[in-house]
Amino acid sequence: MISTTGWRTGLLTLSGAIASVIVANVMYWSLGWEGLIVLASFFVSSSVWSKWKMEEKMNVEEKSAKTSHRDWQQVTANGGPASLFSMLYAINGAEVWLLAFLAALAAANADTWASEIGVLSRWRPLSIRTFKVVESGTSGAISVLGTLATIVGALFIALIGTVIFFEWDFSILVVITLLGIIGSFLDTFLGAFVQVEFRCTICGINTESKYHHHLQTVHEKGILFINNEVVNAASGVVAGAMTLFFYV
């Protein structure tokens, strides 16, 4: 239902809708309706922020290889780690994998909220690599508004997951929120230091896209195969895996 709605409203491409059906079915098989509620909380809230003041974000999309229409790569990068941990929980039954599932989604939600809300800040963000003010939407940059969105985004998923699975266990709420924030900040770090970035030879803009103005861009920095989706997936995996340090 959510996948179909997302496709019809333009939030998902066809490939994104198909990927989201797969992710949702994996989580339903692993965790039942409870898992789907947490996933839906991530998707719906992120979609709302994605559409919010979208006209003001149009210039920011120029810097990104992706648009607000999420394809299968974006869906897999954000939902894949959580799906993996949910399967491990279904197979193994150890509670740590359920916590890892929540931490991975908390990280994905925190990063998405930070990206969608942070770009609307009145003040331009600061690059953590150069410590210089950069354009909104630059990977590896932080702002006060984006940081606040990170914290609230992680807390949002942690709160829902804790209520559904752990009956308001405050210690778990704190841990999942913390790991979600760490995952989002790891995403920022990787975006600053290893994520690939290109430069348009026509207008000079730095972008994550291989093409701009219908011409191929030139490599500016980062590792060629590490794009935004790789960074998102890695951050989710690390956030989830870090639950092992707390509960094993």
Image (cartoon, grey):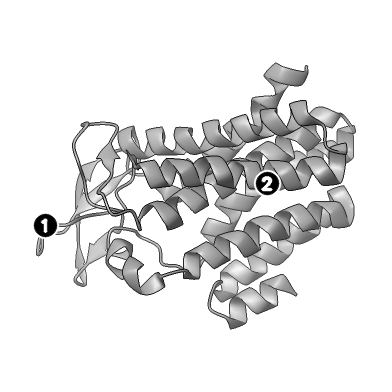
Q: Residue 71 carries which label?
A: none
Q: Nearer the viewer, mark 2 or mark 1?
A: 2
Height in image: 206 above or below 161? below
Name the residue rendered at 71%, 40% in the picture. Answer: 102
Q: Position of residue 230 (x, y in %)?
A: 47, 44
Secondary-structure class at tag 1 = loop
Identify the residue position indicated by label 1 in the image: 204
With 200 as the anchor, is 31 left or right in this view? right
Q: In which quarter of the image is the C terminus?
A: top right
How many marks the image carries: the answer is 2
Pointer 1: residues within 10 angstroms few (<14), some, or many (20+)? Answer: few
Q: Where is residue 155 in the image (x, y as percent from the top left)?
A: 63, 41
Name the residue rendered at 86%, 49% in the picture. Answer: 31
Residue 58, can we see it?
A: yes
Splitting the image into 4 quarters, where does residue 210 fall? Answer: bottom left
Identify the residue position indicated by label 2 in the image: 157
Residue 84, can we see it?
A: no
Height in image: 218 above or below 15? above
Height in image: 211 above or below 231? below
Pointer 2: residues within 10 angstroms few (<14), some, or many (20+)? Answer: many
Secondary-structure class at tag 2 = helix
With 163 as the anchor, is 219 left or right in this view? left
Name the residue rendered at 70%, 26% in the picture. Answer: 243
With 143 as the anchor, is 88 left or right in this view? right
Amino acid type of the residue tagged 2 in the rendering: Ile
Q: Where is residue 127 in the image (x, y as percent from the top left)?
A: 26, 37
In contact (CB < 8 Å): disc 2 and disc 1 = no
Amino acid type of the residue tagged 1 in the rendering: Gly
What is the residue that sits farthest to the front in this orientation? Answer: 122
Name the residue rendered at 87%, 29% in the picture. Answer: 94
Label 2 and label 1: CA atoms lie apart by: 39 Å
Q: Quadrant of the N terminus?
A: bottom right
